[in-house]
Amino acid sequence: IKSNRPCITALEAIIVDLPTIREHRLAMTTMSRQTLVIVRLSCDDGIEGIGEATTIGGLSYGDQSPESIKLTLDHYVNPLVIGMDATSVNAVLAKVDQSVQGNSLAKSALETALLDAQGKRLGAPVHALLGGAVRNSLPVLWTLASGDSARDIEEAKQLLDIRRHKVFKLKIGKRSPRQDIEHVAAIKNALGDRAEITVDINQAWSEATAARHIPDLQAAGVMLVEQPIARDNRRGMARIARMFNIPIMADEAISTPADMFDYASDGAADIVALKIAKSGGPLGVIRVAAVADAAGIGCYGGTLLEGTIGSIASAHAFAACRRLEWGTELFGPLLLKDDIVVERASVAEFELAVPDAPGLGVAIDEDKLAFYRRDKTRTTVA
Ligand code: MUC
Ligand code: MG
């Protein structure tokens, strides 16, 4: 269909390496830097949309790496979208879905950039394009993952004192269950009623280990247990969810509305960690949340430790979810020493404010992008 509507003229994917403020230890990897893929989408009305695709630890967390995301965007997505009407986000995404299977992270960055551009064009924040925000700020937890209990306690006390976070997630599953439970109990004891504690096992336990040690986590005062066993063991998750009163959250196991439907049908989780990266963007997350809502499963706003662009894109989506009973973990920008945006996301009084400016409400800092991009051969035009 011929129209006078603005067309997509360029899609650029830029790999950026940023240092973290400290080591971040998870069951599958230890991070000392974070790699973002930044997407810039240009349109022939002069509007640019930006997006971000970010994973954890190369290929150790998921099956898409920063390098494969860039390759997917450069070689497969780019030729499909150039020349398309930039205002129909759904039509662009449908065309890409037809020829590109999977690759939810690349799709998430594209969808984010399209929504950012359309928001700027209409003078509306992304959350308004998603039907409007139900809340204008989001509670944000912090992950204690230095690898050292005393240092984690120190960090948590400081963050409580400055009223930045009052819920802390502990990454366990790397050490023995006994060591992990001692670590969890030591932190909960030191913080007492000042803080809530959650644990993320990132699939590291077997079903038998989970059945044996979840009662210890419950006794230590843990609020919820995230992804205790393998992502593809849905029946095992259902048995665990039935066995314990402590809420069980599915993360790696649920990406699409179909995954959510299967989990809901089997009663295999009490809560789902929503992530734009898993679901192909803000619109994708809202579709998963709708299935969760229909099944009475609680929603939680998850992260793959994105920087400001990806975290704010997530915030717009989570602000538009009807129910978000379990808060969010959009602390990724705070784990970075620096970022490539003019104004970095910040958390105050335990909450992250959802921007109201047109689009995402985030602008790239060209000097910082030029400094941190992996491919330094390109310099920004003055
Ligand atoms: C995950 O599995 O939830 C979220 C917070 C964090 O520290 O790691 C991520 C990934
Ligand atoms: Mg998780």
Image (tube, rainbow, N blue to C red):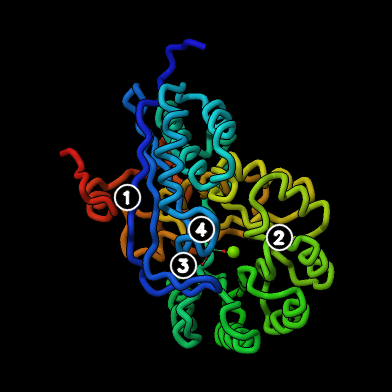
Distance, label 1 to label 2, CA atoms, is 37 Å
The amino acid type found where label 1 is placed reads Val
> Which of the 4 image quadrants contains residue 84?
top left
In front: label 1 or label 2: 2
Foreground tag (3 vs 2): 2
Q: As drawn, is 336 to the left or to the right of 91?
A: left
Q: CA distance from mark 3 to mark 2?
A: 35 Å
What residue is at 47 percent from the left and 69 percent from the top?
163
Query: For mark 1, what is the residue?
Result: 341
Q: Which residue is mark 4?
A: 304
Residue occupied by mark 2:
232
* Residue identified by numbered label 3: 164
Q: What's the distance in space between the residues labelled 3 and 4, CA to CA?
A: 20 Å
Amino acid type shown at disc 4: Leu
Along the line of sight, the residue nearer the viewer: 64 or 190: 64
Q: Is label 4 or label 1 in front?
A: 4
The residue depicted at 52 percent of the width and 72 percent of the height is 26
What amino acid does circle 2 point to? Asp
Residue shown at 34% from the left, 22% from the top: 44
Tell me which amino acid carries mark 3: Arg
Q: Which of the two discs, 3 and 4, labels the residue nearer the N terminus?
A: 3
